[in-house]
Image: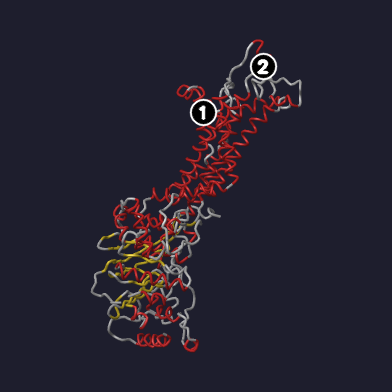
Amino acid sequence: MPDGAMQKPLVSVRGLKMHFPIYAGVLRRRVGEVKAVDGVSFDIREGETLGLVGESGCGKSTCGRAILRLYDLTEGSVKIDGTEIGQAGPETLRKMRPTMQMVFQDPQASLNPRMTLAAIIGEPLDEHTSLTRTEKRERVYELMDAVGLNRDFANRYPHEFSGGQRQRIGIARALALNPKFIVCDEPIAALDVSIQAQVVNLLEDLQDKLGLTYLFISHDLSMVRHIADRVAVMYLGKMVELAPRDGLYGEPRHPYTRALLSAVPEPDPRIEAEIKHIILKGDVPSPANPPKGCNFCTRCPEVMDICRRVDPEFREVAPGHYTACHLYPETSTKTAGQTAASEAAQSIQQGD
Amino acid sequence: MTDQSAAPEHQVVRPPRSQWWDVWDQFKKHSGALFGMIVFVTILLGVFIGPWIYHADAQFVPTGRDFIALKDTRPIYNAIWDSGAKVNWAHPLGTDQLGRDTLARLMMGGQVSIAVGLAAMGLSLLLGTAIGVLAGYFKRLDGPLMRLTDLFLALPLLPLLLVAVLLFREPLAATFGPEGGVFVLIVTLVGITSWMQTARIVRGDVLALKEREFVLAARSIGTPNRRLVMRHILPNVLSPIMVSATLGIATAIITESALSFLGFGFPPDFPTWGRLLFDSVDRMVLYPERVIWPGLLISLTVLSVNYIGDGLRDALDPRIRGR
């Protein structure tokens, strides 16, 4: 797929912060906040797929939902297709909804058990268009064809479908209004492997046909490698690395990315035995109380003194390759740390 | 699941069918519900159409020699085992101690009792559902509304009802007429004192439901709160609402009886099932039919409504439907 460096960004996120308050005590006073997403900035270009990876609880899903303004942002700006929606009111948002849609993680939970398939797929049409009953039915059938569902299923209820079919319903619903941008929030996490491939291929076909832009949230690194053009890695509410797919998988810069990639199992047992996995020690710190300095300093194998004091800046270390790490103080000079880093990357690459 | 596999060669695409047909199909399969429906409709017909066929004045008290002749008539079936029983074909279910026709009184009382039951249940459901949904859905309203619910739960009901009747009977009677005033008063009172359970149950369900992903999905489509509640939340809290509705009818009929018994309900000569029951309690041993008939009718109504509710709840749930 083309890198699309020339294309203009469809989505641009600047300094996105999503903090959830914690109330405690008898008086239910606000005692702190969970910094689920803490200052994230990136662009998604038109027609590309940005993969967003990270371990559980790092704020990927919150980030995806915040971009669609399903939450009220604590801070930051989100611009989609030229319209600022970061702090937009309900009316502006409602007008923007057809442009941006979402596919959810759990296909069982994301479909109302009391609505028929036709009603579920038709709901966006009810909300945003004034089609007649027949036109609407035609459009629903069209969408069902597009995602490969038998037209005869229109009267059935979600519980009568398999997981893969339900996810197709979810995708059809997201497509109903011809959106430009779709957030796929772990759309394959709840499916088994054979169905995952089907759904991912369906998403890719639709992208080719309709020119969609995806934010593909997942913790499945190999699936992201398959579908994404660029990949962003999140850790504890912050973005630690953002790079074109090949750059990130080939030469990961941030120690966390390296650890994450080295955790991907290798099917060949002989190679698997030789790989040096980077095993991170300890747990992810609580997002309610992140460490001072770099968020990753508590577990980083290459932690330095400065990491515990100063939060590293998110900057470009190679063309299109951004990372937030003190190992790369300047863009061009090669430090001792970076040599070590590329060595470590080498060992992972052998595993590829 | 009506069709297992449509042959691919001649695939017939049926247009979306109205959900209510599926509901009716499933309802018919629930034998208890169907039986309950038949009983309830029979009672309704008997009570509302009956007086058109069976002409007798429920409030007519005979005087003079008629009074002696007509009072305390036994039901006609007593003649089967007691040849000396005082029976009269003009009064198939006998008369009471004032010579009023029991069957006519049952019919007239039924009209009032069922109307009170349905109206009070409707009001309490409306209040309970509205307050439950508001409290569960809007976080800001949760605290105040639930404290209000606790407040109502803590009120001693009967004294409150008595005071309210004393205060409001006169002005309401002036507006709606003596019986109409009491009807409005009782429906309102029973309604606003029995919504709390519904509200609590609904709030709990709404709290759980609004975190479900399909609600989030609807929000991501841009569905405004009002339609989100109507389309996604309410249909999914239907089961507990249905259960409290069916129980609510029984409570309403019984509360009305209690009020009438204490003399705070309808006027003494105005029959309701509860009133008939309480009027006959002191001579229950001599005239058991005067207790049995109203009691039986109250029980049958409550039971049949319960079964209807049960069947409706099952029929409205697509996961149970078709099994």
Q: Position of residue B288 (x, y in %)?
A: 71, 28
How far across and down, in percent of the image, does residue B42 sit?
Answer: 57, 34
- Residue B227 at what x, y percent from top left? 39, 49
Say which chain tag 2 marks: B
Q: How is the image coloured?
A: secondary structure
From the viewer's perspective, is residue B189 above or below residue A101?
above
A64 w.r.t. B261: above or below: below
Disc assigned to residue B183: 1
Front position in the image: B73 or A325: B73
Considering every residue shown, the one lying at the far top of the view is: B64
Number of numbered callouts drawn:
2
Of pointers 2 and 1, the one earlier in the residue sequence: 2
Q: Which of these two is toward me, A139 or A84?
A: A139
The residue lying toward the viewer, choosing from B87 and B96, is B87
Is residue A149 shown above or below B203? below
Q: Amino acid at mark 2?
A: Leu
Residue A306 x %, y %: 37, 78
| Chain of the residue where label 1 is placed in the rendered structure | B
Q: As drawn, is A308 to the left or to the right of B54?
A: left
Are labels 2 and 1 assigned to the same chain?
yes
Tag 2 residue: B70
For residue B88, which quarter of the picture?
top right
Secondary element at tag 2: helix
> Can you tell which mark lies on residue B64?
none
Question: Which residue is found at the position 74% from the left and 21% from the top?
Answer: B85
Within-10-Å neighbours for mark 2: few <14, some 14–19, many 20+: many
Question: Which quarter of the rendered picture does the N terminus of chain A lie within?
Answer: bottom left
**Can you tell which quarter of the image residue A326 is in?**
bottom left
Do residues under tags 2 and 1 come within 8 Å of each other at their CB atoms?
Answer: no
Mark 1: few/some/many CA within 10 Å (<14, 14-19, 20+): many
Q: Amino acid at mark 1?
A: Phe
Callout 1: SS: helix
